[in-house]
Image: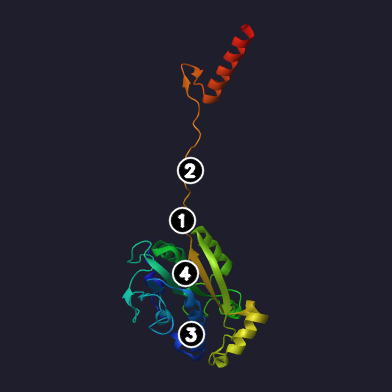
Amino acid sequence: MQGTNEHSGAYPDWLNSPIGVALCDSERQVMSAALEGVFGEHLLQIGRWGDAAGFVDLARTQHAATVYAQGVHGGTLCADFARLPFDSDSVDAVILPHTLDLTDSPHDVLREVHRVLRSDGRLLMLGFKPFGLWGMRRLWSRGKFPPQVQQTLGERTLRDWLRLLNMRIDQHQRFFFRLPFARMAGTYDAQLEHAGQRWFPELAACYLLQARKRVAAITPIMPRWRRRARVVGGVTEPSLRNVVELFDRSDSDDDNRG
């Protein structure tokens, strides 16, 4: 399998532009609210997006780390996203900030995330909507916007992939309603976000999808209370009920003879 770090290692420099800064501010607001209910021991952010420190400073877990691709600075460690250096079932939560948008092997990354997550572990994914305002500009620009993005994955596609991995969708949120032009950029606008989520959510640029790894079901083996009658020499072994019936018949025969 070809490593994904060769294709997802280029950091999107356009995030330093005004519209990129506005997007990162909006995503930080969304992720801060989402992480309020995420607890446990270990949280990972896989892939750099925005500030070098990522979203881990918002985490409420005991430990948090960033895993960036080779050549990307600022992470706790560098690794191939499809071969993470962590034990199976060892991580409580994973953040994928547009990581699947920036790699050409999203299936491999998701499978590896599923492997390292503990049962009931949380997955938080940021992605670009293929058919929002930004998705339409991507079609007009023949895939050149947003820059360095490999593909945009639809929410329905991700839901199908997660179901195949036996992961349950918990929450889904669409956000960032600014037009995809630099001159429209600015600071985070709470009123615009509220209006967009209420009146035209399909036009959002991004989504946050939260999923949970299902706990493996355990089917208890119930004891067998009834014992089947044994066959000895072709004759069924009499049960207690049969013995009682035999005694009753013998008493009735003796009375008739008497």
Are discs 1 and 2 less than 8 Å apart at CB?
no
Q: Which amino acid does the dot numbered 2 rest on? A: Met
Residue at (61% x, 77% y) in the render: 132
**Relative vertical location of residue 227 with respect to residue 58 in this rendering, above or below:** above
Say which label, 3 or 1, has the lower sequence index.
3
| Eye-nearest disc, 3 or 1 | 1
Q: Name the residue that disc number 3 marks.
A: 24
| Eye-nearest disc, 4 or 1 | 1
SS at badge 2: loop
Q: CA distance from mark 1 to mark 2?
A: 19 Å
Residue placed farthest to the right in the image?
199
Q: Is residue 39 left or right of residue 258?
A: left
Say which label, 1 or 2, has the lower sequence index.
1
Say few, some or many: other residues with alpha carbon within 10 Å of mark 1 (under 14 / 14 to 19 / 20 or more). few
Are discs 3 and 4 less than 8 Å apart at CB?
no
Across and down, in percent, residue 127 comes to 52, 75
Say few, some or many: other residues with alpha carbon within 10 Å of mark 3 (under 14 / 14 to 19 / 20 or more). many
Q: Nearer the viewer, residue 218 or 203?
A: 218
Across and down, in percent, residue 34 comes to 50, 77
Q: Nearer the viewer, residue 120 or 128?
A: 120
Residue at (48% x, 72% y) in the render: 124
Say which label, 3 or 4, has the lower sequence index.
3
Kindly identify which numbered label has been placed on residue 123: 4
Say few, some or many: other residues with alpha carbon within 10 Å of mark 2 (under 14 / 14 to 19 / 20 or more). few
Say which label, 2 or 3, has the lower sequence index.
3
Q: CA distance from mark 4 to mark 1?
A: 17 Å
Quarter of the image for residue 58 reads: bottom left
Residue placed farthest to the front in the image?
258
